[in-house]
Image (cartoon, grey):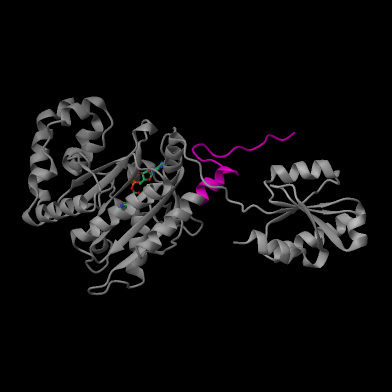
């Protein structure tokens, strides 16, 4: 036998009934987004690689180590998207959607690709839900996006999580923080790992991405962006905090939270669930007021977040929360004998056309086996068709909950079931 294939490392198949949980998570997200006035955007799975290098930053791990880059047959330098924001910003600019005093609010449900070391909760192809909001400069937009983010977890039943918040400042206050951080880092440079040493001059904020315990310990007292906020950033942060408190959205401040992407300005946040182990970040987001301009558009503020679907589902499993079943309860049509089986197929189709889920037997089983199958399929009614029923023109319809049977004219069966099964 030829060798069978396996999924590529770091990817997984989603089979039923697990796919039901995915549909539930995605449907809840759509519902929440629609409540907040967001509409869906779909962008390509691959983009020019330079878009991500410029948007996310070429010193970030995502761009420098994890991106799936390739050349197509026409010699174009492309990349599978490692996240959703850059593509959405590209679309916003390309379609000329910037307008004064107008806000553009979109959501997406996408797969992303990062060449990371696979482990529980970390994959090379993973899936995100996310939103982006363009044009709203004030902290009320930040509060609304954070509220939407929390509303999704609430709708899934995940309320036991931690929201951490930070402000990363803006081009006005960043230089003084950068300088203070660089001089603190230079003082301990020989003890830092090689990667962090390389970051001191190129992009010092990225040292906070380092996972090495030695670097983390050395960075414990490093200057934080919060100590260097300009009056505008301070006021934005203070108002956001007051608004979150008024909305009863609890949070903690983490001055070490810098996120792994370079585009953030001012607000940044993450939600963690400790039950997930090492990969405990459920989602992350923030404001990116310079990104549209940096990618060639009119200066437009932006803010958004993305949340891992796999990690949300792992959290639900950890909490013992089950997704509702995907398939509606329906009807099993049991045909007995060649003639009745042929009629059962037609009747099942008529029932489906009337809007009710209907299943039949594919293996010429006897009545007992077919009713057991109806049970396994959680059918609400069984329609039994044998020679007697064909002769009388009436099917036997059995209520599988009460066991009560009734004779219903064959032609009237679909409508009879529709009236009882479709809410
Ligand atoms: P991110 O923090 O890189 O942000 O990713 C957001 C979430 O995606 C993570 O918290 C995690 O749940 C999930 N995730 C990321 N990589 C993986 C992986 N390899 N395996 C499993 N889950 C993963 C962004 O992507 C930004 N674009 C968020 C954003 C939108 N900021 C503003 N707008």
Q: Is residue 212 above or below residue 22?
A: above
**Looking at the image, residue 22 lies above or below residue 354:** above
- Give coordinates of residue 287: x percent, y percent: 24, 55
Q: Which of 178 and 169 is in front in this view?
A: 169
Describe residue 39's horizontal placement relative to residue 170 as left or right.
Answer: right
What secondary structure predominates along the stretch shown in magenta? loop
Is residue 4 on the magenta stretch? yes
Quadrant of the image containing the C terminus: bottom right
Instruction: Using the rendered view, name the quadrant where residue 271 is placed.
Output: top left
Number of on-image labels: 0
Residue 266 x %, y %: 18, 52
Query: Is residue 64 or residue 127 the one in the foreground?
Result: 127
Q: Is residue 217 left or right of residue 303?
A: left
Q: Which of 419 and 229 is in front in this view?
A: 419
Quadrant of image for the N terminus:
top right
Q: In this view, does 51 lie to the left or right of 379?
A: left
Q: Can residue 234 be seen in this view?
A: yes
On the picture, is 256 further left or further right than 87?
Answer: left
Q: Give the range drawn in magenta.
A: 1-23
Query: Residue 409, image x and y in percent?
Result: 82, 65
Is 264 above or below relative to 98? above
Does residue 71 appear in this view? no
Which residue: 75% across, 43% down? Answer: 373
Please give the name of the residue rendered at 17% of the width and 50% of the height, measured from the top-left corner: 241
The percent coordinates of residue 327 (x first, y second) are: 61, 52
| Location of residue 215 by image quarter | top left
- Residue 325, magenta (yes or no): no
């Amino acid at each position: 036998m030829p060798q069978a294939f396996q999924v590529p490392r770091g990817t997984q198949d989603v089979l039923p009934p697990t796919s039901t949980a995915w549909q539930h998570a995605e449907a809840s997200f759509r519902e929440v987004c629609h409540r907040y006035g967001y509409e869906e955007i779909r962008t390509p799975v691959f983009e020019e690689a330079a878009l991500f290098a410029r948007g996310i930053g070429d010193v970030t791990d995502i761009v420098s180590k994890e991106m799936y880059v390739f050349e197509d047959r026409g010699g174009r330098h492309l990349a599978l998207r490692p996240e959703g924001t850059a593509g959405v910003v590209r679309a916003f600019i390309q379609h000329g959607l910037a307008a004064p005093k107008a806000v553009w609010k979109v959501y997406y449900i996408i797969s992303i690709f990062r060449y990371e070391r696979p482990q529980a909760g970390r994959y090379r192809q993973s899936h995100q839900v996310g939103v982006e909001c363009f044009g709203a400069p004030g902290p009320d937009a930040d509060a609304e996006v954070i509220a939407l983010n929390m509303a999704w977890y609430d709708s899934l039943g995940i309320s036991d999580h931690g929201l951490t918040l930070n402000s990363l400042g803006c081009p006005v206050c960043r230089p003084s923080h950068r300088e203070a951080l660089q001089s603190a880092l230079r003082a301990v440079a020989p003890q830092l790992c090689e990667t962090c040493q390389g970051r001191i001059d190129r992009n010092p904020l990225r040292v906070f991405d380092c996972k090495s315990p030695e670097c983390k310990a050395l960075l414990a007292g490093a200057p934080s962006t919060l100590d260097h906020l300009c009056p505008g950033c301070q006021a934005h942060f203070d108002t956001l905090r007051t608004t979150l408190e008024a909305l009863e959205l609890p949070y903690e401040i983490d001055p070490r939270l810098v996120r792994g992407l370079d585009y953030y300005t001012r607000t940044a946040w993450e939600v963690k669930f400790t039950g997930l182990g090492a990969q405990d970040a459920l989602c992350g987001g923030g404001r990116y007021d310079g990104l549209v301009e940096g990618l060639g558009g009119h200066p437009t503020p932006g803010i958004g977040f993305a949340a891992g679907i796999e990690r949300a589902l792992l959290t639900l499993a950890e909490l013992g929360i089950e997704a509702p079943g995907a398939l509606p309860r329906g009807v099993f049509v049991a045909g007995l004998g060649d003639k009745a089986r042929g009629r059962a197929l037609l009747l099942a189709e008529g029932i489906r056309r009337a809007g009710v889920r209907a299943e039949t037997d594919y293996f010429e089983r006897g009545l007992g086996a077919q009713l057991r199958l109806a049970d396994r399929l959680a059918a609400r009614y069984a329609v039994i068709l044998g020679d007697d029923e064909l002769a009388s023109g009436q099917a036997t319809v059995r209520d599988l909950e009460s066991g009560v049977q009734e004779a219903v004219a064959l032609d009237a069966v679909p409508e009879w079931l529709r009236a009882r099964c479709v809410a």
